[in-house]
Image (cartoon, rainbow, N blue to C red):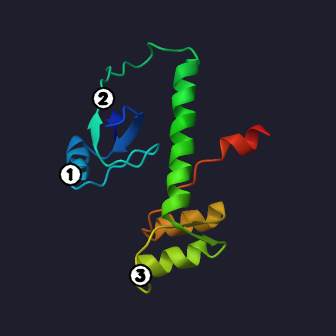
Amino acid sequence: MIVYNLRCENSHEFEGWFQSGAAFDEQAASGKLVCPMCSTHKIEKGIMAPAVAGTKKDAPAADELKKMRQFMTGMRKYIKENAEYVGPKFPEEARKIHYGETDERHIYGEATVKEAKELIDEGVEVAPLPPDLDEEAN
């Protein structure tokens, strides 16, 4: 896994995790990358510092926490605007899509940890929806 600092044409900065440098290049060339804040597909690598183990033991700085919060909020917004909510039927719908029993589409919903592990074991790609940080603050 490789982590890149990314920046969109509107100067939003966020992290992207990729299997390899080639995976980033392929996704960027095919227009699969999207800014979680403004949904633009014009994404480039930002300036990065090398990660050196053991050099930073302090808690993340306030600006880093702000960036993480902004990223999670943007990702959650993007998913809710671009995917279908299927509620507790998520495991069933995800399997139908995976096995070609229904049209491929982006979905989100609810699943237990056990159900999510079973989906992953079957090769179904799933990921948790970032929490609504504004809701948790109340």
Q: Which mark is residue 103?
A: 3
Q: Are marks 3 and 2 in contact (CB under 8 Å)?
A: no
| Amino acid bearing label 1 | Glu
**Residue depicted at 34% across the width and 35% down the height:** 6
The residue beneath circle 1 is 26
Q: CA distance from mark 3 to mark 1?
A: 25 Å
The answer, for residue 60, to whether it is visible in the render is no
**Residue depicted at 56% across the width and 51% down the height:** 76
> Between 68 and 116, which is closer to the camera in this rendering?
68
Specify the farthest residue to the right: 138
Above or below, 113 relative to 5: below
Q: CA distance from mark 3 to mark 2?
A: 36 Å
Residue 81, given in percent of the width and then of the height, sits at: 52, 60
Asked which secondary structure carries label 2, the reply is: loop
> Between 94 and 80, which is closer to the camera in this rendering?
80
- The mark closer to the camera, 1 or 2, is 2
Asked which secondary structure carries label 1, the reply is: helix
- The quadrant the C terminus occupies is top right
Assess disc 1: are there few (<14), some (14-19) or many (≥20) residues with their C-alpha within 10 Å of its C-alpha.
few
Query: In terms of image quadrants, where is residue 105?
Result: bottom left
> Between 27 and 18, which is closer to the camera in this rendering?
27
Asked which secondary structure carries label 3, the reply is: loop
Q: CA distance from mark 1 to mark 2?
A: 17 Å
The residue beneath circle 2 is 46
Give whichever of discs 1 and 2 has the lower sequence position.
Answer: 1
Q: Are marks 1 and 2 in contact (CB under 8 Å)?
A: no
Query: In terms of image quadrants, where is residue 88?
Result: bottom right
Left or right: 85 with respect to 34? right
- The quadrant the N terminus occupies is top left
| Amino acid bearing label 2 | Gly
Above or below, 82 relative to 92: above
| Amino acid bearing label 3 | Asp
